[in-house]
Image (cartoon, rainbow, N blue to C red):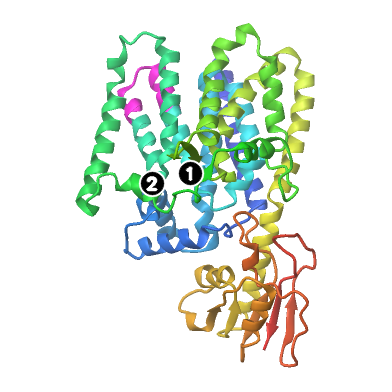
């Protein structure tokens, strides 16, 4: 009887994490945003070339730890906007599961479940899972390297050390700052072995695997492009100041503002997550330090490298990567594990109060997930609807800006199409847009509408300002009149000339 009860509890635990993963998937599908970030057309063009067997010397082609999964998905399910984002969505689910495994390994099952739920509803995690945010994939590799490292320590396993090293390498291949996870593995080394170095020989499989993988990469680069450090150098192209940003007061204020306040579009990207983090930090007691310090230091190490680490120094002035909002996807997971430890402590002290506050926090987080994905769902959704409408018209001449035309040619035309019918017009002022559009003799002109809320070139949106259409212009369709300056200052309109 006791045996059956234990087996039943084990099955329940297994199904609980599956339920959380299923809930996470549904939430991300409901809030799906899709293609629309500034680099998405470039990513797509590079990966489509690889799909067709053409590889050139570019950073997008070097990132094989990202494009191999994508090409496999395209081969299996075809090329569409959804399959373009699918590797990110799957990586997000993988990150939820890994956070569960790591928290369970470091603490216990209940902490793991709490951590997975917090990851499932974290507004920033939900947002990035619905976009072409390759750093979600990077986070998956970094979390995998940590998980296999700490489990290799628990029951010494050369195989797991080897796998951990492999994921460090794959993180680096995804983006060079994937190596930021190495100080974290070193941190867990000292957690397991103390300050003694006498057991370093046990970790030789990890170090040797890293050595072999990186040597292989450098040799391959030397053979193929005559530069053993091509993989690193390719990411430095066109990154001289001012293309990267000087570390100054403004740069250092961007992430803290994002963490605790609404962004420029009125959204709480992180909800109340970082407020809760500060509260938990204040609640640390002496007996907690031994258990929690590795996770806290993990969070602080990653945050330091993303926020403060200088990537270039010129004339004794430090410069860093631009403050890209999606980089926080590698900062959030350790902070969630840290917070989960204290939620579990609250559960042990007062179950009723825990369930009341935890359910309230989850409910609020789901709302903030809705809020954080709002502008991308609106922006990318309206463009998607306009393209679907144009598809129903058959082979017609279409004139609009580069992003709109590129999206037609990338996703919404199945089989053969005639790209000559799709005309990309480039301008930066209402007067320039009018002049170019008025030269159109026949076809459909698409103006206004929302474009690229993040990384947006708002002057590149084909806005006409105060425009009196000529007699030969007919307004065929107008989408939502709701305006969201600066990324939507005019309704999206389709004209027939």
Residue that badge 2 annotates: 65
* Disc 1 to disc 2: CB gap under 8 Å: yes
Q: Determine the secondary structure under disc 2.
A: helix
Q: Where is residue 473 in the image (x, y as percent from the top left)?
A: 72, 88
With respect to residue 418, does 232 lie above or below? above
User: Magenta: predominant secondary structure element?
Assistant: helix
Q: Is residue 394 above or below residue 202?
A: below
Horizontal and vertical percent for residue 253? 65, 37
Is residue 418 visible in the rendered image? The answer is no
- Helix or strand or loop: what does disc 1 sit on? helix
Residue 178 placement: quadrant: top left
As displayed, is residue 494 above or below residue 39? below
How far is the residue under mark 1 from the one under mark 2? Answer: 9 Å
Q: Give the range drawn in magenta.
A: 147-162
4 vs 455: above or below: above
The residue pinned by badge 1 equals 137
User: 237 or 346: nearer the eye?
Assistant: 237
Q: Which residue is drawn at 65% across and 81% down?
A: 445
Residue 161 lies in magenta, yes or no? yes
**Quarter of the rendering occupied by the C terminus:** bottom right
Q: Quadrant of the N terminus?
A: top right
Q: Where is residue 359 in the image (x, y as percent from the top left)?
A: 76, 31
Residue at (75, 48) in percent of width and height: 266
């Amino acid at each position: 009887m006791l045996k059956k009860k234990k087996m039943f509890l084990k099955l329940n635990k297994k199904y609980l994490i599956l339920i959380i993963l299923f809930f996470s998937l549904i939430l991300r599908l409901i809030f799906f945003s899709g293609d629309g970030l500034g680099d998405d057309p470039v990513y797509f063009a590079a990966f489509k070339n690889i799909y067709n067997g053409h590889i050139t010397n570019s950073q997008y082609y070097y990132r094989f730890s990202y494009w191999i999964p994508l090409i496999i998905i395209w081969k299996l399910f075809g090329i569409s906007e959804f399959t373009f984002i699918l590797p990110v969505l799957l990586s997000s689910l993988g990150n939820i599961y890994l956070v569960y495994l790591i928290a369970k390994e470091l603490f216990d099952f209940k902490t793991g479940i709490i951590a997975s739920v917090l990851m499932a509803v974290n507004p920033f995690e939900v947002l990035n899972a619905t976009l072409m945010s390759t750093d979600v994939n990077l986070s998956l590799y970094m979390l995998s390297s940590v998980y296999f490292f700490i489990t290799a320590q628990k029951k010494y396993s050369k195989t797991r050390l080897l796998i951990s090293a492999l994921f460090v390498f794959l993180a680096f291949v995804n983006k060079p700052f994937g190596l930021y996870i190495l100080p974290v593995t070193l941190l867990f080394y000292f957690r397991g072995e103390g300050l003694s170095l006498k057991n370093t020989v046990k970790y030789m499989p990890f170090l040797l695997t890293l050595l072999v993988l990186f040597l292989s990469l450098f040799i391959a680069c030397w053979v193929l492009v005559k530069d053993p450090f091509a993989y690193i150098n390719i990411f430095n192209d066109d990154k001289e100041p001012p293309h990267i940003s000087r570390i100054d007061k403004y740069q250092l204020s961007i992430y803290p503002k994002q963490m605790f306040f609404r962004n420029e579009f009125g959204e709480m990207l992180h909800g109340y997550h970082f407020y809760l983090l500060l509260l938990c930090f204040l609640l640390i007691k002496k007996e907690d330090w031994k258990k929690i310090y590795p996770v806290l230091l993990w969070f602080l190490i990653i945050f330091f490298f993303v926020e403060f680490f200088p990537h270039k120094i010129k004339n004794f002035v430090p410069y860093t990567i631009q403050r890209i909002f999606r980089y926080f996807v590698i900062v959030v997971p350790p902070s969630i594990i840290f917070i989960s430890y204290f939620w579990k402590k609250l559960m042990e002290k007062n179950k009723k109060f825990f369930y009341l506050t935890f359910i309230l926090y989850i409910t609020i987080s789901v709302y903030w997930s809705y809020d954080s994905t709002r502008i991308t769902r609106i922006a990318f959704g309206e463009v998607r609807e306009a393209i679907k409408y144009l598809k129903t018209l058959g082979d017609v001449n279409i004139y609009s800006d580069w992003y709109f035309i590129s999206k037609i040619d990338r996703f919404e035309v199945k089989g053969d199409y005639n790209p000559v019918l799709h005309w990309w017009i480039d301008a930066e002022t209402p007067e320039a847009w009018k002049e170019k559009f008025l030269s159109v003799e026949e076809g459909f002109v698409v103006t206004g509408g929302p474009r690229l809320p993040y990384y947006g070139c708002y002057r590149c949106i084909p806005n006409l300002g105060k425009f009196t259409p000529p007699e030969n212009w007919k307004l065929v369709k107008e989408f939502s009149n709701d305006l969201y300056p600066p990324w939507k200052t005019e309704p999206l309109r389709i004209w027939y000339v």
